[in-house]
Amino acid sequence: MPLALLALAIGAFGIGTTEFVIMGLLPEVAGTFDVSIPTAGYLVSGYAVGVMLGAPLMTILGTKITRKRMLMLLMGFFIVGNVLSAVAPVFGLMLAGRLVASLAHGAFFGIGSVVAADLVAPEKKAGAIAMMFTGLTVANVVGVPIGTLIGQQVGWRATFFAVAALGVLGLLGVAKLVPDMPKAEGVRLRHEIAAFRNVQVLLAMAMTVLGFGGVFAAITYITPMMTNVAGYADTSVTWLLVLFGLGMVTGNLIGGRFADRALMPLLYVSLSGLALVLALFTVAAHDKAASAVVIFLIGALGFATVPPLQKRVLDQAAGAPTLASAVNIGAFNLGNALSAWLGGIVIAAGLGYTAPNWVGAVLAASAVVLAFVSSALERRTNAGSRVVAGAVPEPVRAHAAHH
């Protein structure tokens, strides 16, 4: 794998760390600004909204410059946003810093996926995409626990300065290692937008929303579920999230390895397995050991879908994939927000802390249905193409063969 993928992975590591580390620092941040925990929670939801809006916006703005320069510009936004968060004297300014940093997220992964895929041979594209996303998954295993520890021991501002330093490292890596590949000739914004008329692109994005909705329906409420139902101590939740992160790393690497060989079968297996495991979690959540195993499997099965779904979007939007790739990253965050909302509804309805697992199972099962629909439509399209090709009159084919 080219060294340029390392630079992309470093940037992904920083972005993954800043997205998730805030969850472990909400009490400290709320105390500093004298706001409630729910108000401090806007730093999480505001970031997710920024990713969804920033992914298409920043990608569209970047159509006039090369992908390398756009990646460097995005890392610049990331650095500025985290420094602003670190020095913010009031809560509103910190929220603004989170929004600035979030603008880099979707477009960086979207454009980075295209760049990663272009750096390698066609049969290695999913593996290259997975290599970049490894930075995001490792962030949950290493970056988030260390960032939380720094925040608790030294102060949360130190955490955001450290994350900004990661951004500088990522920027330097992109500048030094990523080749300045020319933009595709003749590709305009209208071509990028036209990709959304392809039903296969929309189906892949819908699978992303539902599949990751399944994952985060359970993980969003993992703390009350594990402490109130499984009987874990509050201090154990950090290590359960590390276990989830290890599952993400494993699933991402498996997804990258097999997506180039059997993309749709991989989606059938991973999404079906995810739906089954989430359904089982409603029972397994009552046992500590079973809970730990299931949390790992949710991370593994959920992230095994990332390289194939991202590659699916790139393949179906071939020729002008950048905007579609970035919007698919926004779809992950839409799934997170949707599942957190639905999970909150079933808990508020008095169905218990394990009820979001059923929500997740239904969302993941819906993604399986869409995967089969996508395959059926593709087979029908391919069969129609063969019929049209075979409809050429015999004398014409003979004449063409003769020449």
Image (cartoon, helix red, strand yellow):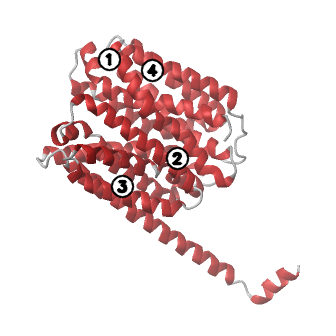
Residue 319 seen = no
Q: Is 188 in front, or is 287? A: 287
Type of amino acid at the residue the image marks with label 4 = Asn
Q: Quadrant of residue 6?
A: top right
Q: Give how far apart the Cα atoms at labels 4 and 1 are.
A: 18 Å
Q: Which mark is residue 274?
A: 3
Tell me: 194 left or right of 366: right
Type of amino acid at the residue the image marks with label 1 = Gln
Query: Residue 64: x percent and y percent?
Result: 64, 36
Residue under label 1: 152
Quadrant of the image containing the N terminus: top right
Q: Is residue 141 above or below residue 294?
A: above
Mark 3–mark 4 CB contact (< 8 Å): no
Q: Secondary structure at mark 4?
A: helix
Extreme residue in the left direction: 350
Name the mark nearer the viewer: 3 or 4.
Answer: 3
Quadrant of the image containing the C terminus: bottom right
Mark 4–mark 1 CB contact (< 8 Å): no
Query: Residue 314: x percent and y percent?
Result: 58, 52
> How busy is the neighbourhood of tag 2: few (under 14 within 10 Å), some, or many (20 plus)?
many
Q: Secondary structure at mark 3?
A: helix
Looking at the image, tell me whether mark 3 or mark 1 is earlier in sequence order. 1
Please report the residue visible at 29 percent of the width from the left and 46 percent of the height from the top: 217
Type of amino acid at the residue the image marks with label 2 = Leu
Residue under label 4: 82
Residue under label 2: 253
Looking at the image, tell me whether mark 2 or mark 1 is earlier in sequence order. 1
Name the mark nearer the viewer: 4 or 2.
Answer: 2
Looking at the image, tell me whether mark 3 or mark 4 is earlier in sequence order. 4
Q: Secondary structure at mark 2?
A: helix
